[in-house]
Amino acid sequence: MQSLDKILKIKYPVILAPMFLVTSVEMIKIALDSGITGAIPAMNFRKENDLKLAIKDIKKHSDKAFGINLITNRSNTKYKKQLKAILDSKPDFVISSLGNPKDLIKEAKKLGIKVFCDIVNLEFAKKVEDLGADAIIAVNSSAGGHSGIIERDELISQLVNNCKIPIINAGGVSANSDLNHVMSLGVAGASVGTIFMASHECHISDDYKQALIKYGKDDIVLTRKLSGVPSSVINTEYVKKIGTKPNILELLVKNNTFLKKHAKHLITNFGMKKLEKAAFSATYKNFWVASKAIENIKEIQNLSVIIKKLVQPK
């Protein structure tokens, strides 16, 4: 099975993960210059034309492969417009998240755009494989943001033994030794996020960056308050105060037959507003998304340096 560097014609089999309101055009450019690839969330852009301009800007900077992350479930009311903008702009690949990627795969294939699909278990992996996905992104229980439920090595084993398309690990990689380990298990590459937030070029708040240094792996908890699905966040005093489980109102809305159709949209939009505040407001009264990789974050460095340490042995 081909490795990600061969598939995308890049130097190292690593994706700078698409982190909502965190991954930027500037970070993608540095990733491409450093020999890896990267993907930026379509949801980072308020208007579809801004998404098109961002793709054009990255293409002007480099001829190396990069991608866009697209949320494909009902919570994304801009799905059709974002899909059209992506198809018009033709990035090298699209990462689908949180929904059925059938239409995306069908339309992208016509243009030679690869589709990598986020999955959390073997059942969904087989479904997207049958739909024609080019690769599977295996989101395990160590991933930041929307986390999986199965431990890294176990999920990799299940997929390697049962799927025919390339598997890209997401979660539990924060050092060169981690990267080498997952590659030895048979994956094509790794999608990495949290360690790249601790870079000078990442435009989150200084308090957020300092929290990445201050807290450790035991301070990461799962919450359903952001988008209705498990998301890994730093267990700050604020998170401890409000808890990690949906409140009664959230549960009523989500489980009510009449309101269920709109529940995901309402909860997701509420969660994204929380994330936007968390990324750029210097206060602990918010959610700070991260994975257990914060255990290995000791200082803020240039992004190119962090990438080099990840892909090259000491």
Image (tube, rainbow, N blue to C red):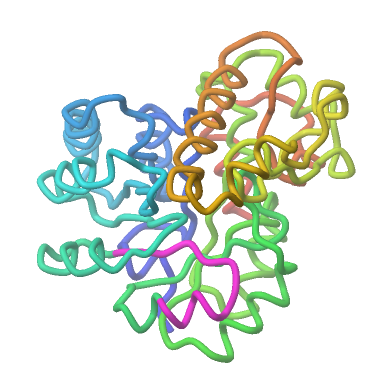
Instruction: Using the image as rendered, state which of residue 290 and residue 299 is in the foreground.
Output: 290
Q: Residue furthest front?
A: 258
> Based on the displayed image, in which of its 4 quarters is residue 60 positioned?
top left
Q: Is residue 87 left or right of residue 203?
A: left
How many numbered marks are there? 0
Side of 164 relative to 289 (left or right): left
Q: Position of residue 220 (x, y in %)?
A: 80, 41
Residue 269 x/y as whole percent:
47, 32
Location of the N terminus (image quadrant): bottom left
Q: Nearer the viewer, residue 207 or 15?
A: 207
Query: Could you tell me which residue is drawn at 72 percent across and 73 percent down?
Result: 153
Magenta stretch contains residue 123: yes
Q: Is residue 254 left or right of residue 65?
A: right
Q: Is residue 240 above or below residue 218?
A: above
Judge from the rendering whether residue 8 lies leftward or rightward of residue 22; answer left or right.
left
Query: Which residue appears at 72% of the width and 77% of the height?
Result: 154
Residue at point 16% right, 41% down?
85
Q: Position of residue 309 (x, y in %)?
A: 63, 45
Is the residue 299 above or below the residue 79 in the image? Answer: above
- The residue at the far bottom in this view is 161
Give, as a single range, the part of the protein colored magenta.
115-127
Relative image position of residue 195 (x, y in whole percent): 65, 39
Q: Is residue 25 magenta?
A: no
